[in-house]
Image (cartoon, rainbow, N blue to C red):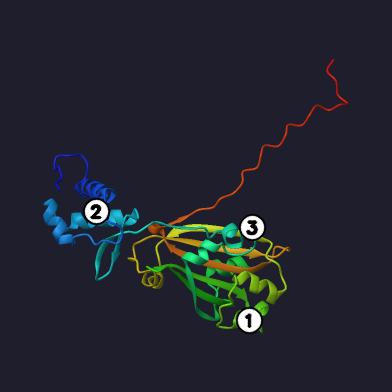
């Protein structure tokens, strides 16, 4: 493996191209550890900082993952999640069977906390207003892939099962509909990319400079009053969001007015 010092392309990009090709060929398979930064620097005859830039670039592309204190590995299969409003409720009002088969959701805490700004805005209350929050993580066999939270008004949830540290064996919204006597009728999803908080990076086992995808899901009743505000955060380079939907057919052109005739 060599680089061309006279090429217009920066050395770290040349190295990245060669590593991509070797991973495509199967020289390093999913989950396999790459040589150390010093070892690769010696292979290419460059400074360690150049190799580090290469690793950072491929990590942000989702090709490599870095485990602190362990090394750099080829990322496994890119995770495809259908976790938007349609994916959450589905045609038959329940999580898709393949989600339950591939992912395990674990409830981590239930309690009252001050609402963060985006949640307070969604409920139309002041920042820091006390709300009920149910926090969870979602895991595969290999890793934690989601950090999430569902928020409810204390006045709505007080005295209900939503306050208990208990998994319900069915989607949370079904429990909420029955306990609160309100049907989930509308939903909005807002997705943004940002840097993780320190806690998110630790739970997801990603570097603090790895971008994450963040979902803010607001569910409303038929009067457009929020019932639940849910947050979900995923490691961006390793996650794709996929949603399938029908495209409506064009509306037919209106016919001529029968009461109007050309002269």
Q: Which residue in the protein does label 1 denote?
A: 161
Q: Mark 1 to mark 2: distance in Å?
A: 50 Å
Q: Residue furthest top?
A: 263
Q: Tell me, yes or no, whether the two marked residues, 2 and 3, touch with CB atoms within 8 Å.
A: no
> Does dot 2 land on a helix, a strand or a loop?
helix
Q: Earlier in the sequence, mark 1 or mark 2?
A: 2
Give the class, few, some or many, for how many residues have Cα within 10 Å of label 3's Cα (few <14, many ≥20).
Answer: few
> Does dot 1 land on a helix, a strand or a loop?
helix
96 and 48: which one is in front? 96
The quadrant holding residue 8 is top left
Numbered tag placed on residue 54 in the rendering: 2
- Count the marks: 3
Q: Position of residue 70 (x, y in %)?
A: 24, 69
Give the class, few, some or many, for how many residues have Cα within 10 Å of label 1's Cα (few <14, many ≥20).
Answer: some
Residue 228 in the figure: left or right of residue 254 = left
Q: Tell me, yes or no, whether the two marked residues, 1 and 2, touch with CB atoms within 8 Å.
A: no
Q: Position of residue 107 (x, y in %)?
A: 50, 77
Q: Tell me, yes or no, whether the two marked residues, 1 and 3, touch with CB atoms within 8 Å.
A: no
Indicate whether 192 appears above or below 120.
above
Q: Quadrant of the C terminus?
A: top right
Q: Position of residue 10 (x, y in %)?
A: 21, 45
> Does dot 3 land on a helix, a strand or a loop?
loop
Numbered tag placed on residue 91 in the rendering: 3
């Amino acid at each position: 493996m060599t680089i061309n010092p006279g090429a217009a392309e920066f050395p770290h990009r040349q190295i990245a191209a060669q590593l991509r090709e070797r991973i495509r060929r199967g020289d390093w398979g999913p989950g396999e550890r790459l040589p150390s930064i010093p070892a690769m620097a010696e292979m290419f005859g460059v400074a360690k900082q150049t190799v580090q830039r290469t690793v950072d670039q491929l990590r942000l592309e989702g090709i490599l993952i870095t485990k602190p204190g362990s090394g750099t590995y080829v990322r496994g299969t890119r995770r495809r999640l259908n976790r938007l409003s349609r994916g959450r409720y589905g045609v038959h009002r329940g999580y898709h069977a393949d989600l339950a088969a591939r992912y395990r959701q674990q409830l981590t805490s239930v309690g009252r906390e001050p609402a963060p700004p985006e949640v307070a805005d969604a409920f139309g209350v002041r920042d820091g207003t006390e709300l009920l929050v149910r926090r969870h993580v979602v895991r595969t066999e290999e890793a934690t892939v989601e950090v999430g939270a569902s928020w409810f008004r204390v006045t709505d949830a007080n005295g209900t099962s939503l306050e208990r540290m208990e998994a319900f064996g069915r989607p949370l919204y079904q429990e909420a509909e029955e306990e609160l006597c309100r049907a989930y009728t509308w939903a909005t999803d807002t997705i943004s990319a940002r840097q993780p908080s320190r806690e998110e990076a630790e739970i997801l086992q990603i570097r603090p400079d790895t971008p994450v995808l963040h979902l803010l899901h607001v569910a409303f009743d038929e009067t457009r009053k929020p019932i639940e505000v849910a947050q979900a955060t995923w490691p961006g380079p390793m996650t794709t969001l996929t949603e399938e939907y029908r495209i409506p057919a064009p509306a037919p052109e209106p016919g001529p007015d029968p009461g109007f005739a050309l002269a």
